[in-house]
Image (tube, grey):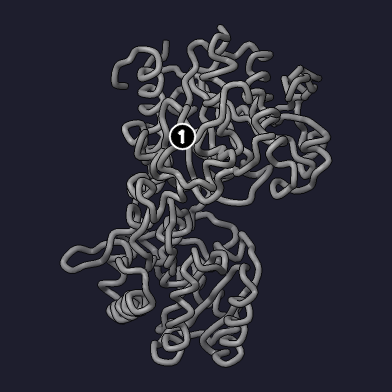
Amino acid sequence: MITNNSCRILYLSTEIVPYARTGGLAQVASALPRALRRLGDDVRVMIPCYGLIDPHKRGFKRILESFPVPHENDVELAGLWQAPDPDLPIYFIEHDRLFGSRTGIYSFPDDGERFVFYSRACLEAARHLGWQPHIVHCNEWQTALVPNWLRTIYAADPFFAKTAVVYNIHNLSYQGIFGHRVLEMAGIENFGFIAHPDVSTSLNEVVSMVARGIIFADVIVTVSPTHAKEILTPEFGEGLDPILRDRQNRLYGILNAIDISDYDPRRDPNLATCYDSDHTGDRNHCKTGLQNEAGLPSQLHVPIISLTSRLNDQKGYDILSTVLEPLLRFVPAQWVIMGTGEQRYHDYLLDLQERYPQKLRVFLTYSESLSRRIFAGSDIFLMPSRHEPCGLDQMVAMRYGALPVVHATGGLADTVKNHHPPTTGTGFVFDHYDGMALFAAIVRAVEIYDHQELWSGIRRQAMSQDLSWERPAHAYRDLYRRAWALKFTGLPG
């Protein structure tokens, strides 16, 4: 029985900072469990022990030398390590062939086998630890078979008799598409192949890990309320919208947050000068520092517009590329762009940088320390994504006092309040996904920048937003209890 004060949560993630990271999931997997533990829940995280993680150098403790994991029609052995973290138990599933021998995280030809094994090993590790979870919180396609298993091969297992599953979708574009062979590896080929009459023939002919997570989970959650509505439509559902509509009474959206103790301009060592919302004058040192680093003229009266993202169409470069040169020519602003992506956009930006060296600096790289100096030194942060389930950078930008210009989609719509007099707002939002709407939003922001008293009020409002994990953690606590109640009492949670 789950009480209001105690819930055992097994949190499965293939990434977590500071050990393995490719995107926002790694930050969420570290921050959310910590926030939940502060509220009194017993949360434990399990991730694979990749080759890039050296347990001995990291000071890990060996918890289980080896334990058996059913795999295909056989059993393989795994090990279990624990990180020396006083605030959060983080366990690492060890298997040399599938993880230890690889320096990367994803994009291997046997990824299906790798993450089937990892997910099954997490359940078996909990058994060998004698720690029975009330909830297994699964993230993304790599762990999506866990709900399927708990409804099939573990359905009569007394150890998991009181375990419910929350399945978390962060990016529906990555579905874990494999052939039928993956069902044999997972030991569920005898339970039949799943097809949906309203899903495309091509998708019905393969195994979509995500589809199984959606179908079998007790509760499905995605990373913003707006995105939870968007994915019910063909435009955003990535072919799975019929399945999601079937389960929409179990679908929720909880907005992600950021680690405000990490992203804190009052004490960030990467910045030229630290500051807060009451001392934004000190921010000018960060601005001139960024201008010097970028090789741009030191001009405090000119706004700096920045972007830090992948260079591809999903992040808005298809519409930005239609208006960027006119903006450089006619709008008084400097631009700092950091990121890597498609070669055509590399070439495009480098050509513009050569022709507008006093207005544009491009960093074709990713650097965490540079990104923080960009947040602190720029005035306007651009995030024109075609779709964005949640997005974290717009929150970091507000935290650091760079006002975001965003497309009204997903978490961008949920986090940025459009400045529209007489309300102050926290940034600038455009509704239609096209170049002219983006152009107009940028021009509006630059024009308001000239009215510094008004700009300071918007910036203060943006910097004062509650972007911490406290509110989402409470929402997840409620969701865990609802998932458990739905499965075991038949009552609304």
Q: Residue at x 36, y 64 (%)?
A: 407
Residue 420 on image: x %, y %? 21, 67
Q: Residue at x 50, y 79 (%)?
A: 335
Q: Residue at x 62, y 68 (%)?
A: 340
Asked whether 61 or 154 is in front, the reply is 154
Residue 189 in view, yes or no: yes
Where is 98 relative to 300, above or below?
A: above
Residue 318 on image: x %, y %? 48, 73
The residue singled out by tag 1 in the image is 214
Characterize the local packing of mark 1: few (<14), some (14-19) or many (20 or more) Cα atoms within 10 angstroms.
many
Asked whether 271 or 382 is in front, the reply is 382
Quadrant where the C terminus lies?
A: top left
Where is 176 relative to 72, above or below?
A: below
Asked whether 288 or 13 is in front, the reply is 13
| In-image side of 355 versus 314 (left or right) | right
| In-image side of 463 versus 87 (left or right) | left
Q: Which residue is at the far left?
A: 422
Residue 356 on image: x %, y %? 54, 90
Q: Quadrant of residue 451?
A: bottom left
Where is 490 relative to 479, above or below?
A: above
Q: Quadrant of residue 452?
A: bottom left
Type of amino acid under label 1: Ile
